[in-house]
C-alpha cells in the first residue's frame, strides 16, 4: 500500500463517475423545471420548483400516453414474470439434463443451446406471425411468454449442478431423498447466489425491453414505461419535456434500485456465469 | 463433463424439460424455420400462390444498394460503439483496480448505469444534444458549430454512437474489472521486479493477460450494438435523417413492420441469424480452446 494519494486514479475515476451522474442529475433537474423554459433551451442544472410533476405524470401521464402508474405496473408485471419464469423453467430443465438420463437428452440440450443464438431482434417478422397464429398479439401472455425461454440461465444452472459433489448426491440418496426432495433441500439452497444474480440480470432485461413490446402490444393498455417514454418524445410537436424527464426518472428507479441493492451477487453472478 | 451419480426414471425429467423445450420450439425454432422458408419462396401479389425460388431473395438483397449501404453502416456503427465503449471501460477499470480510498464508491457509481434501458439512455442524450433544448448543443452553437442531428446525417450517427456506447460502458467495466482482479498479484509483482512500470507494464503484461476478457467482450459488444441499440436509435432518430442511422435491425423493422415487405424481410432476418450464429460459434470455439490449454 502506498501512502501517497493516487491523484491520477481519483481524477480519472471522478470524470468517469461524472460522465454518468451528470446526465442523470440533468434529467432530474429538467423534470422539475418549466417545460416552456426547457423548450426555449434554457435548461439549468439547478432544479426548479415543479416537483409536483411527478404526481401529475403518475396520475395523468402525458397526451396520448397512459398514466405512468399504469405503465409502471405493466413494466413490473413484465419484468417479474420474465425473471421468475426464466429462473423456474431453467432450474427445472437444467436439473433434468444434469441429473437424469432420458431419451433425447442431448437433443434437448442442443435445442435449448441453439436459442442462445436467436435474440428477438433477428426474428422480428416470423415471430410476430407465429404469435398472431396463437392469438397472443395484444395480450400480457404474448408480452412475456416468448421472452421466458433462456439458454443462458439453463447453461448457468447446469454448470452449478454439475459442480455439486457426487458424495452429496450419494448421501442424499442414502437418506432416502427422492429427486424432488433433492432438488428442494439440496440443489436450490446451493444455487441461492446464482438465483439472486440471475434475478437482477433478468429483471433488468425484462424491464428494459423495447422492440418486443413495440411489436406485440399495440394496445396502449399494455404499454410499458420504456414504450411510454419513446411515445412521449415521438409526439414531436410541443413535447412536455418536464413530463418526459419525470417519466424517465421513474423508469430508471426500479431497475437501478434492484442493481444497487443486490450489487455484490449481481457482479459475481454476471462475471462468473457468462464465461 | 458428465455426472456419475444420477437418478433413474425418465417421466420426471421429461416433464421438467418440457416447458423450456415447448417455448424453444414455438418461439425460436418455428419462427426461425418460417424465416428460412419465407426467404426461399415468393408469394404472388394476392398471397394465393407460393413459389420456391431458391436464393433469389438473397441475390436481390445483396444487389440492393440500400441494403449493402445499411450493412456497411452497421459494421461502422458496431465497430465505433464497441471500440469507444470498451476503451473507456478499460481505462476506468484499470484505475478502479488500484488500491485507493473510496474505490467501493467509485465502483458502485460506475456499475449502476447497467440498469438503464437503451431507450432511456436516448432520453438522457436528448437533454445534452437535442438541437433546441440540449445543453451541449447550445455550447456548440455558441462556439459557432452548426449543430442539428435531426438534419445532419453525420451528426445523427455521432449521437447514436455516443448514446449507445455510453450505455454499454458499465457492462464492460464490470467484466474488465473482474478480469483485472483475476490476474495473480504475483505476476504483477514479478513484472515490477523486472522494472516494467506504468504503460509498459500494462501493454506487455496486463493487456495480454486480459485478452480472453477483451475477446469475449468484443463479441458481446458487437451483438449489443447490432441488436440491442434498436431502442436507442428509434428514440433518437428513427433511423433518420433519411437513412443515415438505419442499421440492419432498424431496416428489418422498417421494411417488415412499417412497409410490410414480408419476403424481403425474411431474407434479412436470415442474414441476421447467420451473422449471430457465426459470432456465437467463433466465441465458443475460442473460449473452448482456451479452457483446454
Image (cartoon, coloured by chain):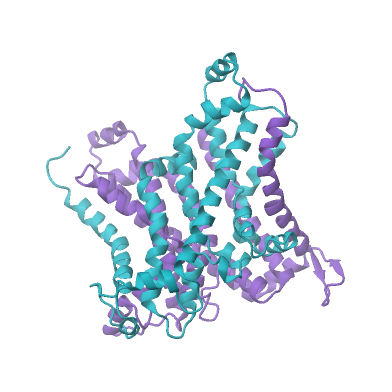
Residue at horizontal 67%, vertical 40%? A110
**Chain corresponding to cyan in the figure:** A
User: To which quarter of the image does residue B134 belong?
Assistant: bottom left
Residue farthest toward the top in the current orientation of the protein: A174
Picture quarter containing residue B185?
Answer: top left
Colour that chain B carries in the picture:
purple
Between residues A39 and B45, which one lies in front from this camera angle?
Answer: A39
**Looking at the image, which residue sits at the far left?**
A3
Q: Residue at x 20, y 44 (%)?
A: B100
Q: Residue B86, can we see it?
A: no
| Left or right of residue A35, residue B240 in this image | right
Query: Does residue A88 lie above or below A169 as drawn?
Result: below
Identify the image quadrant of the N terminus of chain A: top left
The reply, left or right, for residue B141 in relation to residue A258 is left
Spot occupied by residue A9 in the image (x, y as percentages of width and height): 22, 51
Q: Quadrant of residue B16?
A: top right
Residue plotted at (47% across, 75% down): A232
x and y, in percent, of residue A15 in the image: 25, 60
Task: Report the label total.
Answer: 0
Reply above or below: B185 against B170: above
Task: Residue at 47%, 38% (x, y): give it.
Answer: A194
Percent coordinates x, y for residue B54 in the rendering: 81, 63
Q: Nearer the viewer, residue A178 or B133?
A: A178
Q: Is residue A207 visible?
A: yes
Residue closer to the observer: A68 or B104 = A68
Nearer-the-camera pick, A51 or B117: A51
Q: Position of residue A242 (x, y in %)?
A: 36, 76
Amino acid at each position: 500500500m502506498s501512502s501517497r494519494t493516487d491523484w491520477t486514479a481519483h481524477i480519472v475515476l471522478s470524470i468517469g463517475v461524472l460522465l454518468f451522474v451528470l446526465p442523470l442529475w440533468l434529467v432530474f433537474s429538467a423534470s422539475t423545471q418549466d417545460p416552456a423554459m426547457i423548450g426555449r433551451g434554457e435548461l439549468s442544472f439547478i432544479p426548479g420548483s415543479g416537483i409536483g410533476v411527478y404526481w401529475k405524470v403518475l396520475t395523468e401521464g402525458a397526451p396520448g400516453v397512459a398514466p405512468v402508474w399504469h405503465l409502471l405496473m405493466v413494466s413490473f408485471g413484465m419484468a417479474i414474470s420474465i425473471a421468475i419464469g426464466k429462473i423456474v423453467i431453467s432450474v427445472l430443465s437444467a436439473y433434468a439434463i444434469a441429473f437424469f438420463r432420458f431419451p433425447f437428452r442431448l437433443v434437448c440440450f442442443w435445442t435449448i443451446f441453439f436459442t442462445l443464438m436467436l435474440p428477438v431482434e433477428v426474428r422480428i417478422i416470423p415471430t410476430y406471425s407465429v404469435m398472431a397464429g396463437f392469438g397472443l398479439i395484444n395480450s400480457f401472455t404474448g408480452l412475456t411468454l416468448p421472452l421466458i425461454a433462456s439458454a443462458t440461465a439453463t447453461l448457468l444452472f447446469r454448470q452449478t449442478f454439475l459442480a455439486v459433489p457426487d458424495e452429496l448426491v450419494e448421501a442424499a440418496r442414502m437418506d432416502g431423498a427422492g429427486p424432488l426432495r433433492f432438488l428442494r433441500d439440496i440443489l436450490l439452497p446451493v444455487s441461492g447466489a446464482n438465483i439472486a444474480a440471475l434475478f437482477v440480470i433478468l429483471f433488468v432485461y425484462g424491464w428494459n425491453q423495447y422492440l418486443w413490446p413495440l411489436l406485440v402490444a399495440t394496445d396502449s393498455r399494455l404499454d410499458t414505461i420504456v414504450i411510454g417514454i419513446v411515445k412521449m418524445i415521438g409526439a414531436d410537436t410541443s413535447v412536455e419535456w418536464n413530463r418526459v424527464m419525470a417519466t424517465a426518472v421513474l423508469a430508471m428507479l426500479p431497475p437501478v434500485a434492484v442493481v444497487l441493492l443486490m450489487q455484490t451477487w449481481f457482479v459475481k453472478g454476471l462475471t462468473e456465469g457468462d464465461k | 463433463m458428465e455426472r456419475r451419480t444420477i437418478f433413474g426414471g425418465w417421466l420426471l425429467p421429461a416433464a421438467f424439460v418440457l416447458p423450456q423445450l415447448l417455448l424453444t420450439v414455438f418461439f425460436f425454432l418455428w419462427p426461425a424455420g418460417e424465416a428460412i422458408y419465407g426467404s426461399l419462396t415468393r408469394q404472388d401479389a394476392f398471397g394465393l400462390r407460393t413459389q420456391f425460388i431458391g436464393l433469389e431473395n438473397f441475390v436481390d438483397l445483396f444487389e440492393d444498394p440500400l441494403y449493402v449501404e445499411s450493412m456497411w453502416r452497421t459494421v461502422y456503427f458496431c465497430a465505433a460503439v464497441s471500440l469507444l465503449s470498451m476503451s473507456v471501460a478499460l481505462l476506468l477499470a484499470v484505475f478502479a483496480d488500484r488500491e485507493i480510498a473510496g474505490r467501493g464508491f467509485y465502483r458502485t457509481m460506475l456499475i449502476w448505469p447497467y440498469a438503464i434501458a437503451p431507450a432511456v439512455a436516448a432520453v438522457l442524450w436528448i437533454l445534452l444534444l437535442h438541437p433546441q433544448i440540449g445543453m451541449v448543443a447550445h455550447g456548440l452553437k455558441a462556439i459557432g458549430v452548426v449543430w442539428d442531428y435531426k438534419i445532419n446525417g453525420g451528426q445523427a450517427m455521432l449521437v447514436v454512437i455516443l448514446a449507445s456506447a455510453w450505455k454499454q460502458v458499465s457492462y464492460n467495466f464490470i467484466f474488465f474489472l473482474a478480469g483485472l482482479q483475476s490476474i495473480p498479484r504475483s505476476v504483477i509483482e514479478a513484472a515490477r521486479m523486472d522494472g516494467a512500470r506504468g504503460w509498459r507494464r500494462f501493454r506487455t503484461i496486463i493487456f495480454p493477460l486480459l485478452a480472453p476478457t477483451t475477446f469475449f467482450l468484443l463479441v458481446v459488444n458487437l451483438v449489443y450494438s447490432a441488436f440491442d441499440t434498436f431502442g436507442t436509435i428509434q428514440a433518437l432518430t428513427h433511423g433518420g435523417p433519411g437513412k443515415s442511422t438505419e442499421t440492419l435491425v432498424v431496416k428489418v423493422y422498417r421494411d417488415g413492420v412499417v412497409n410490410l415487405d414480408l419476403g424481403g424481410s425474411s431474407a434479412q432476418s436470415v442474414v441476421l441469424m447467420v451473422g449471430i450464429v457465426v459470432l456465437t460459434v467463433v466465441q465458443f470455439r475460442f473460449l473452448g480452446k482456451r479452457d483446454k490449454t
